């Protein structure tokens, strides 16, 4: 059934690249804080090395993962097949937030589609890779990625996106600091 992997080898890389969606989970240190779980799509996950992942984080109504990573770094990425052979893979590790003003952001940004709305790149140093059967995951048929998020970002434009992030991405729902550039621009 389940097993541990030492690294992201060719088979795991092929599995990652075949998935249309993945899930990101993080949590604050405070046990009264809110655990966050977010679905991601839009061709935003990349393998950087045998124990390194990165994903492009789009502008959203919250910034929980960013805030949690700034506080404690803990993150898990989960992928599961919804078509074909059942399988679940989890990548536990330490995440780091790169915003557009940070060194390394521009270089990594070229790995992702050139669409508006990317607010940060999350890099993950993977500490544990495990898989399990996925027998309980229902079968679904992938139709296409949704266009609404990218369409919205294009309509908002750079200034509108900056204003939206200043309003929505300054702090987490548990009042932890999130995007740094938002804090600086509010000074």
Image: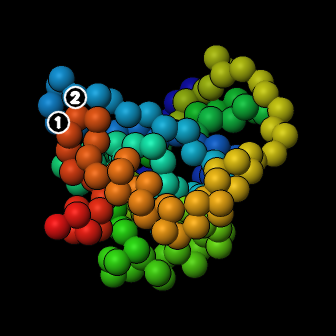
- Left or right side of 28 for 22: right
> Residue 108: where, in percent of width, then height?
49, 76
Compare residues 155 and 126 and report the one nearer the observer: 155
> Residue 99: where, in percent of width, then height?
37, 69
Q: Which mark is residue 29?
A: 1
Compare residues 106 and 119 and report the one nearer the observer: 119
Give SS at disc 1: loop
Answer whether labels 2 and 1 touch (C-beta < 8 Å): yes
- Residue at figure coordinates x 50%, y 62% from the top left: 160
> Residue 163: where, in percent of width, then height?
42, 60
Graded by Cα atoms within 10 Å as few (under 14), some (14 to 19) or many (20 or more), the crowding at tag 2 reads some
Q: Is residue 79 above or below residue 112?
A: above
- Name which quarter of the figure residue 62 lies in: top left
Q: Is residue 142 visible?
A: yes
- Residue at figure coordinates x 17%, y 36% from the top left: 29
Graded by Cα atoms within 10 Å as few (under 14), some (14 to 19) or many (20 or more), the crowding at tag 1 reads few
Figure label count? 2
- Residue at figure coordinates x 20%, y 44% from the top left: 176
Q: Is residue 59 above or below residue 91?
A: below
The residue labelled by disc 2 is: 33
Compare residues 186 and 109 and report the one nearer the observer: 186
Q: Whole-Å distance between the Cαs marked 2 and 1?
A: 7 Å
> Residue 93: where, in percent of width, then height?
34, 50
Q: Is residue 90 visible?
A: no
Q: Is residue 137 above or below residue 30?
A: above
């Amino acid at each position: 059934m389940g097993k541990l992997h030492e690294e992201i080898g060719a088979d795991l890389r092929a599995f990652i690249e075949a998935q249309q969606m993945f899930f990101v989970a993080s949590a604050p240190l405070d046990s009264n804080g809110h655990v966050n779980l977010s679905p991601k799509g839009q061709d935003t996950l990349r393998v950087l090395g045998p124990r390194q992942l990165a994903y492009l984080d789009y502008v959203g109504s919250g910034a929980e993962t960013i805030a949690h990573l700034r506080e404690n770094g803990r993150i898990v990425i989960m992928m599961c097949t919804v078509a074909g052979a059942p399988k679940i893979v989890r990548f536990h590790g330490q995440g780091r937030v790169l915003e557009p003003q940070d060194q390394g952001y521009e270089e990594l940004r070229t790995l992702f589609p050139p669409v508006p709305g990317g607010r940060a790149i999350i890099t993950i140093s993977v500490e544990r890779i495990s898989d399990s059967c996925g027998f309980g995951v229902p079968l679904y048929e992938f139709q296409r990625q949704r266009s609404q998020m990218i369409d919205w970002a294009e309509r908002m434009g750079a200034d509108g996106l900056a204003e939206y992030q200043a309003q929505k991405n300054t702090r987490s729902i548990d009042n932890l600091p999130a995007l740094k550039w938002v804090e600086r621009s509010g000074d």
